[in-house]
Image (tube, coloured by chain):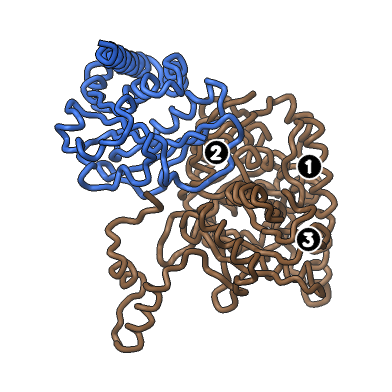
Chain colours: A brown, B blue
Amino acid sequence: MLEQCEGSHAVAQAVALSRPEVICAYPISPQTHIVEGLGQLVKSGDLTNCEFINVESEFAALSVAIGASAAGARSYTATASQGLLFMAEAVYNASGLGLPIVMTVANRAIGAPINIWNDHTDSMSMRDAGWLQIFAETNQEALDLHIQAFKIAEELSLPVMVCMDGFILTHAYERIDMPDQAQVDKFLPPYEPRQVLDPNEPVTIGAMVGPEAFTEVRYLAHAKQMQALDLIPQIAAEFKQLFGRDSGGLIKTYQTEDADTIVIAMGSVLGTIKDTVDDLRAQGVKVGVLGITSYRPFPISAIRDATAKAKRIVVIEKCFAVGIGGIVSRDVRSAVRNRPQPVLTVVAGLGGRAITKASVHKLLQDAIADKLELLTFLDLDWGIVNRVLEREKTQRRSGPIAEGVLRDMGTVASKVAG
Amino acid sequence: MFQLRIHGRGGQGVVTGAEMMSIAAFLGGRHAQAFPSFGSERTGAPVVAFCRMDDKEIRLREPIMQPDAIIIQDPTLLHQVDVFGGLKKDGYILINTTRSFGEMGLGDFVKGFRPERLLTVPATELAKKHVGRPVPNMPLLGAFAALSGLISLTAVQSAIDQKFSGAVAKGNQAAAKEAYDIVMEHAKNVQETQHA
């Protein structure tokens, strides 16, 4: 049924429709509304056969999910930013043990400097932790991906992180089509664990593995993610058949067939980029967009095929690896290796800075004119940066950088725009 | 696409106002997107929220920098925040106040705007009268429905029913209705004056 609601509400409903048996969470912005919503559904009796466990930290949240999942329960949690870092050890354990937990990451920057706004630094920090990572473009897709995530996770016996842009999606009201329980039940069968802590058939989970077998166990984790490259599109196709919507899959393309320039990005910024592409297309510029839905496993072949005819690739990413540059673009480079097309990195939207159509438009014009450098920071204020660098040269006690930048800008209160 | 920006202070229901606007637009069969300015807001601090409406899916995610309409829930912001930033010349301005544009010192500023798109309503007073609390967002929604015709009063009333219940819903509906009627009456008078 169509409704107009907040992204967090849509996700809470989708998780509830997936019949989780254990939900454990610790509140952190911008994820909070999701677990609040689920808490209410459990308390009101709308979500039955589900235990909602308040925990004392994010580390505990995921640890409880690990225990619950090992005992055979469909388990869910959600977090963001520092919360994800605080549960880092358990993140590796959940995947290493092969437990199909689904976790929402309401993407948010990581401090210091402390910042509650959106970028992708948090989930990127866990990109090599063995979880699948899928990114939502809209609230409809966030809703759909959660339902698909349980199926993917349980099929593979691996945990799945559903990443959605904090605030931009979690706090946005938009139109969504909410499936009913019967439809979801038809798509998502009850959880049938590959491994379970059952007193009647006792096993241990979490053995110590020495050098004789560690590589094999780790390789099997990789092999499973490679299986996911086939499974994810298959489940998206099943989903489409039942629900009639294109959601999920490995990648999505828009106007890429004849494009000289292909922009690659993940998450909600794809909408703004598509609008910009429409404007440029109207002027006769051959540009297209490729959205990466599955970041882990990374769809090397799909990206390689979809970009085969492009002259250049521009990767707009909401994160970067300090000391080297792009993260997503580095993965894209490995997908298009041995090809002459340049892969240009654009770091944008850090800590909630708005990615505007005007900035993307100018950026793409520069790219098309071959004026874009290999690494660009969108809308970077060079005046402020140079002022700080100059101060550091001339003054030994130049003071804390963040405070200095704020003082130079005359910032009284943080603002995104307006 | 129609883009609207609401300025107010934490505690005045600014974000809720934008959300309800989007629900009313949705009930009218349109696509709508509402979102806050994502600050770490506190009671009394300046707050901004946005709402877009269109007949097709809305993909754009940037903040609204060139709005077609501005709603100001607290006139004391006029001297603190660039509330009119980027407003289009044929845009709508709706301010919660008992005073006129001239009395607020905006007479010169609004020259060149279309007078039938400029409006002040005593939304706080209406809220106090009907809801018992100075929360002006729902009467402003009612006034905006009348001013712009983009959302209907019926849709506003239904949106209120979705979000609130009991006396709070009834009070807000009454406040929105009275604001709507004031604006319609005002528009009729303006028209009659123009014809005279």
Q: Earlier in the sequence, mark 2 or mark 1?
A: 2
How many numbered callouts?
A: 3
Q: Answer above or below: position of A399 versus A94.
A: below
| Residue to which mark 1 is pinned | A236
Asked whether residue A67 is in view, the answer is no
Q: Earlier in the sequence, mark 2 or mark 3?
A: 2
Q: Position of residue B149 (x, y in %)?
A: 43, 20
Mark 1 crowdedness (10 Å alpha carbons): few <14, some 14-19, many ≥20: many
SS under mark 2? helix
Residue A205 shown left or right of residue A364 in the figure: right
What is the CA distance from the residue labelled 2 to the residue labelled 1? Answer: 21 Å
Q: Which one is nearer the viewer's eye here, A1 or A406?
A: A406
| Residue to which mark 3 is pinned | A307
| Residue to which mark 2 is pinned | A7
SS under mark 1? helix
Q: Which one is nearer the viewer's eye here, A373 or A176?
A: A373
Q: Chain of mark 3?
A: A
